């Protein structure tokens, strides 16, 4: 769901840069950071980067990769989870051209803020259960996709209104997001057992 | 922690296999499919140092492997570095 350059109007891109920056600054202030967190955040971020490289082929010419916003929220709590996700997105955009430069703020907002915080809220509402982890993975990514749909729908450069972009993005990712939910739940079950 | 490092190494090693499989079915991101349905074109202004997880002049699968290793290392350093700096600045 990395939005490339050219999909967003400049004022929307700038607004989302500001929103993403403020949210990340707030996260850094609020995060509880002890010494063990330095390598832990690094490992989760590197793990999500590696997991996102694995494009699972799906019949009918599409593919999906794990996004990881929910898992990073569950493992690191949302404030540090958002920093881990933003690090992944920054490296993807700067080194690999994955996601645009003008749209980096939007991509961070969708996948490092919306995805992470919506996922964590669901995880907490469902009492940190396996079901909660599944819903966090599934609906976290769907919420991020709906936001992406709103952003590109509001941009005149995309040429389609949000009446089209939100349902298309939302429904597509709500289907693919089930896989994200299952992987998140399995990973959480494994981590919880080991902890 | 050790399991995390091992998982990352396994995923990087698997990346070229997945790249091959994705090619078999015709890989496309959902957002790209949506854009194609709606006839919208990307306007790339920057393609990155290792565009599309490849290394220029290197076999694409080996390029994917190198990209995975480089990317995971840089992401680890960036995320860990930011947290380390934030911790230091609070002291």
Image: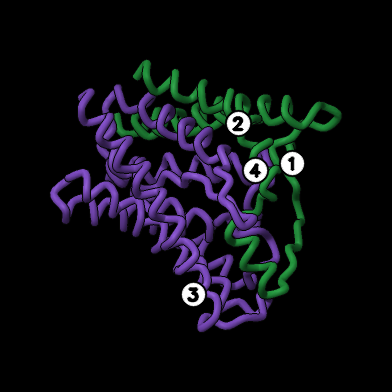
> Which residue does the numbered mark 1 point to in the structure image?
B51
> Which residue does the numbered mark 4 point to in the structure image?
B22
Is residue B75 visible from the viewing direction of this image? yes
Asked if the residue at tag 4 contacts the one at tag 1, i.e. Cβ–Cβ closer than 8 Å, the answer is no
Q: Residues within 10 Å of mark 1 (few under 14, many from 20)?
A: some
Residue at the (28%, 54%) spot, across then down: A135
* C-alpha separation, residue under disc 2 versus residue under disc 4: 10 Å
Q: Share a chain, discs 1 and 4?
A: yes
* C-alpha separation, residue under disc 3 versus residue under disc 4: 26 Å
Comparing labels 2 and 3, the label whose residue is closer to the camera: 2
Q: Quadrant of residue A83?
A: top left
> Which residue does the numbered mark 3 point to in the structure image?
A166
Asked if the residue at tag 3 contacts the one at tag 2, i.e. Cβ–Cβ closer than 8 Å, the answer is no
Question: What chain is colored green?
Answer: B
Query: Chain A's colour?
Result: purple
Q: Chain of mark 2?
A: B
Q: Position of residue B52 (x, y in %)?
A: 71, 42
Which residue sits furthest right?
A: B57
Using residue A102 as the reference point, say whether residue A35 is left or right of it: left
Q: Is residue B83 above or below residue A81?
A: above
- Where disc 4 sits, the SS reads helix
Comparing labels 3 and 4, the label whose residue is closer to the camera: 4
- Where disc 1 sits, the SS reads helix
Q: Is residue A114 above or below residue B75?
A: below
Q: Share a chain, discs 1 and 3?
A: no
Q: Chain of mark 3?
A: A
* C-alpha separation, residue under disc 1 versus residue under disc 2: 16 Å
The foreground one among A158 and A62 is: A62
> Which residue does the numbered mark 2 point to in the structure image?
B15
- Of the two numbered discs 1 and 4 on the same chain, state the one appearing first in sequence: 4
Residue at the (60%, 31%) spot, across then down: B15
């Amino acid at each position: 769901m990395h939005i490339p350059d050219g999909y967003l109007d400049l004022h929307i891109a700038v607004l989302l840069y500001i929103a993403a920056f403020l949210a990340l600054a707030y996260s850094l202030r609020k995060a509880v950071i002890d010494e063990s967190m330095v390598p832990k955040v690094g490992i989760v971020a590197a793990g999500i980067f590696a997991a996102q490289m694995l494009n699972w082929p799906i019949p009918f010419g599409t593919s999906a990769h794990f996004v990881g916003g929910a898992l990073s929220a569950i493992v690191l709590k949302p404030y540090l989870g958002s920093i881990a996700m933003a690090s992944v997105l920054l490296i993807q955009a700067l080194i690999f051209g994955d996601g645009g430069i003008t749209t980096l703020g939007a991509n961070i907002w969708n996948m490092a803020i919306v995805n992470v915080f919506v996922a964590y809220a669901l995880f907490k509402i469902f009492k940190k259960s396996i079901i909660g982890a599944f819903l966090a993975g599934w609906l976290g990514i769907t919420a991020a996709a709906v936001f992406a749909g709103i952003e590109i729908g509001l941009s005149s450069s995309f040429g389609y209104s949000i009446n089209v972009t939100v349902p298309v993005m939302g429904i597509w990712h709500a289907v693919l997001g089930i896989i994200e939910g299952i992987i998140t739940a399995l990973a959480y079950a494994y981590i919880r057992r080991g902890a | 922690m050790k399991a995390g490092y091992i998982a990352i190494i396994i995923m990087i090693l698997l990346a070229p296999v997945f790249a091959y499989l994705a090619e078999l079915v015709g890989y496309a991101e959902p957002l790209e499919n949506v854009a194609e349905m709606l006839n919208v074109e990307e306007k790339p202004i920057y393609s990155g140092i290792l565009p599309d997880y490849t290394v220029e002049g290197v076999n694409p699968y080996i390029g994917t492997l190198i990209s995975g290793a480089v990317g995971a290392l840089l992401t680890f350093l960036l995320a860990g570095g930011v947290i380390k700096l934030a911790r230091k600045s609070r002291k």
